[in-house]
Image: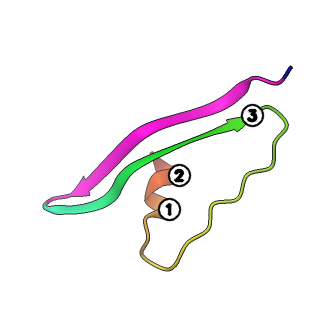
Amino acid sequence: MSTDSIMVDNIKYNYGDIQAVKGITFNVKEGEIFGFLGPNGAGKSTTIKM
């Protein structure tokens, strides 16, 4: 039985009036390989830094 090592539920992040991350939810189980893909400016780095 694998357990969730990382759980993210509806996170959001703003830079002033600009909403950079809009309600992202995901979970990564123990031993799972996880990739976070998207175009430039999509909020990938901001999400990981949170």
Mark 2 neighbour class, 10 Å CA radius: few under 14, some 14 to 19, many 20 or more: few
- Where the N terminus falls, by quadrant? top right
**Residue placed at 81% from the left, 42% from the top?**
32
Judge depth for marks 2 and 3 and give the one in front.
Answer: 3
Q: How far apart are marks 2 and 3 (CA)?
A: 16 Å
Disc 2 designates what residue? Answer: 48
Residue type at numbered disc 2: Ile
Q: Residue 29 carries which label?
A: 3
Q: How far apart are marks 1 and 2 (CA)?
A: 5 Å
Q: What element carries label 1?
A: helix
Q: How many labels does the image show?
A: 3
Disc 1 designates what residue? Answer: 45
Residue 22 sits above or below residue 29 on the image:
below
Please indicate whether residue 1 sits to the left or right of residue 25 in the image. right
Please indicate whether residue 49 sits to the left or right of residue 16 in the image. right
Residue type at numbered disc 3: Lys
